[in-house]
Image (cartoon, helix red, strand yellow):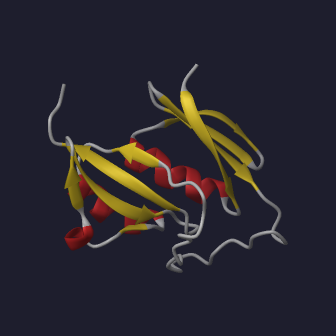
């Protein structure tokens, strides 16, 4: 059993693909309106919501960050620069590199997934 989170999404496929690619995860369960993706330590459940709750963004539309939530997830990536290049191709973005910060043993950047959820990506400076 992995640690994980459930993310609610208007466009399940698009959100799942964003995290699959950036976090090097694989699908482990797929059905209409639901995708479960996982790595060796983390599992994300992307659960659909009806359009009257949240309408999907049009392809190519840049999401507006939703920063007024009680939770912000964070994930390790191998390389922040590569994640910054890939994220727009997947419908999201990382905040500008000048907003990155270094603390403890990692450098971090906030990011926005294809539906506006603000998450943080971290690149380890010291690998154990």
Q: Would you say residue 39 is visible in this rendering? A: yes
At x 51%, y 55%, the residue is 72
At x 57%, y 54%, the residue is 71
Q: Is residue 79 left or right of residue 88?
A: left
**Residue that extends furthest to the left in the rendered view of this protein:** 126
Tell me how many marks there are. 0
Measured along the vertical axis of the image, is residue 8 above or below residue 112? above
- Quarter of the image where the C terminus is located: top left
At x 75%, y 54%, the residue is 48
Using the rendered view, name the quadrant where residue 30 is placed.
top right
- Quarter of the image where the N terminus is located: top right
Measured along the vertical axis of the image, is residue 71 above or below residue 42? below
At x 22%, y 50%, the residue is 103
Measured along the vertical axis of the image, is residue 87 above or below residue 5? below
**Residue that extends furthest to the top in the rendered view of this protein:** 1
**Residue 102: horizontal and vertical position, in percent?**
20, 54
Measured along the vertical axis of the image, is residue 70 above or below residue 42? below
Q: Is residue 24 left or right of residue 66?
A: left
Using the rendered view, name the quadrant where residue 106 is placed.
top left
Q: Would you say residue 27 is visible in this rendering? A: no
Using the rendered view, name the quadrant where residue 95 is placed.
bottom left
**Residue 2: horizontal and vertical position, in percent?**
54, 24
**Residue 96: horizontal and vertical position, in percent?**
27, 73
**Residue 59: horizontal and vertical position, in percent?**
57, 75
């Amino acid at each position: 059993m992995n640690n994980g989170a459930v993310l609610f999404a208007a466009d399940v496929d698009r959100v799942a693909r964003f995290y699959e690619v950036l976090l090097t995860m694989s699908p482990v369960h797929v059905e209409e309106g639901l995708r479960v993706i996982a790595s060796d330590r983390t599992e994300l459940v992307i659960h659909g919501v009806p359009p009257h709750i949240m309408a999907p963004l049009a392809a190519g539309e840049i999401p507006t960050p939703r920063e007024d939530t009680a939770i912000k997830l964070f994930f390790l990536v191998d390389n922040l620069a590569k994640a910054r290049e890939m994220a727009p191709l997947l419908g999201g973005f990382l905040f500008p590199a000048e907003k990155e910060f270094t603390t403890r043993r990692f450098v971090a950047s906030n990011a926005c997934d294809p539906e506006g959820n603000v998450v943080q990506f971290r690149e380890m400076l010291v690998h154990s």
